[in-house]
Image (cartoon, helix red, strand yellow):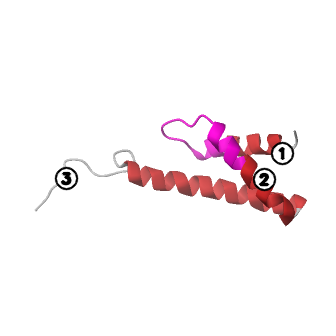
Amino acid sequence: MFILEKEVTSETDPCRSLGGLFKEAEEELSAFLSAVTKTHGPECVTTAAKHWIQALEKAYLPNAPSKECFRKVTFAAVASLYH
């Protein structure tokens, strides 16, 4: 029988925390693209998605990013759409 010394959590298993990170990023991107579709139409979604991904690539994300980090990415993407 194999006994773990520590319980495996998102803090101790980088794969688990990465899964949560992807989920949060996907949720934020989805909400952003839904808002773009409602306000500007589906023809703007591809451009908006590119801006969001570029903002994500430029963003500083701490070791344990939160939903607020991805919200800041969305704000940056919105700002870049209007410049």
Closer to the camera in the image, 28 or 6: 28
State whether residue 68 appears in this view. no
Q: Which mark is residue 33?
A: none
Q: Quadrant of the C terminus?
A: top right
Identify the residue at horizontal 88%, vertical 42% (top origin). 82
Using residue 32 as the reference point, say whether residue 14 is left or right of it.
left
Query: Dot 2: within a 10 Å radius of its alpha carbon, few (fewer than 14), some, or many (20 or more) residues?
Result: many
The residue under label 3 is: 4
User: What secondary structure is marked by label 2?
Assistant: helix
Identify the residue at horizontal 75%, vertical 59% (top origin). 33
The residue under label 1 is: 81
Q: Which mark is residue 48?
A: 2
User: What secondary structure is marked by label 1?
Assistant: helix
Query: Which comes before the other along the chain, label 2 or label 3?
Result: 3
User: What secondary structure is marked by label 3?
Assistant: loop
Query: Which comes before the other along the chain, label 1 or label 3?
Result: 3
Q: Hey, what amino acid is under mark 3? A: Leu
Q: Hey, what amino acid is under mark 1? A: Leu
Residue placed furthest toward the left: 1
| Marks 1 and 2 in Cβ contact (< 8 Å) | yes
Q: Quadrant of the N terminus?
A: bottom left
Q: Is residue 34 magenta?
A: no
Q: Hey, what amino acid is under mark 2? A: Ala
Q: Is residue 82 above or below residue 1?
A: above
Query: Dot 3: within a 10 Å radius of its alpha carbon, few (fewer than 14), some, or many (20 or more) residues?
Result: few
The segment highlighted magenta reads 52-71
Query: Dot 1: within a 10 Å radius of its alpha carbon, few (fewer than 14), some, or many (20 or more) residues?
Result: some
Q: Nearer the viewer, mark 2 or mark 3?
A: 2
**Whole-Å distance between the Cαs marked 1 and 2?**
7 Å
**Whole-Å distance between the Cαs marked 2 and 3?**
45 Å
Using residue 31 as the reference point, say whether residue 65 is left or right of it.
left
